[in-house]
Image (cartoon, helix red, strand yellow):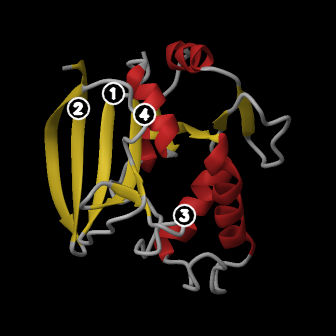
Amino acid sequence: MRKMVAGMQMSIDGKIDGPDGYADWVDSWSDTFDLLPEIDACVLGSGMYAGYEQYWSAIKRDPHSPLELTGNIPTQEEIEYADFALRTPHYVLSKSLASVQWANSTIIRDAAEIERLRKAPGRTIYVVGGAQTVSSLMDRGLIDELRLTIHPLVVGRGKALFETIARRHHVELEDVRRVNGKACLVYKVGGRA
């Protein structure tokens, strides 16, 4: 069975978006865990798909211009992630999307299809978000590991990572790293607590 890892960036009070609907405190959306060599598929929700596709496609088209979302020039790590994102199969969990235009993207309609994907040969599956997708997959017992990048900021109002989780889950801290003032935490997900 393939491992499923969810990676998210959040504030210390558990927010993944601020009151305006985005995480303006994130200075780079690249992977902070050096996980990419282990991954050969990504899963994301339909709410995240459009922005995710636009962000990484913009970097691929012009890696030296400021990005519309952040106003920043992409980091070298983001340029590398854009290459990774465009060559790696992405599965968009959606009951409503009719189609996706991005190369290597496929719509899947329910978590049962993700369970079949986990049983297929391959390496780690990376759940890149969003919050509702991570929560629903955790509730189904499909997330094996959480990798959280915690930014040194209290946001207050905003969207919490686990606001739609249906039940309690036990997690076990596996690793802690400090990267540019952020805490990078790795938790093994152990099921219901």
- Side of 73 where 68 appears, left or right: right
* Residue in the picture at 67% in, 49% down: 49
CB within 8 Å, label 3 to label 2 = no
Q: CA distance from mark 3 to mark 2?
A: 29 Å
Disc 3 marks a residue whose amino acid type is: Gly
| Residue designated by label 4 | 135
CB within 8 Å, label 1 to label 2 = yes
| The disc label shown at residue 21, or none | 3
Secondary element at image label 3: loop
Disc 1 marks a residue whose amino acid type is: Asp
Secondary element at image label 4: helix
Q: Position of residue 138 (x, y in %)?
A: 39, 27
Q: Earlier in the sequence, mark 1 or mark 3?
A: 3
| Residue designated by label 1 | 144
Q: CA distance from mark 1 to mark 3?
A: 28 Å
Q: Position of residue 56 (x, y in %)?
A: 64, 63
Of the residues tagged 4 and 3, which is closer to the observer?
Answer: 3
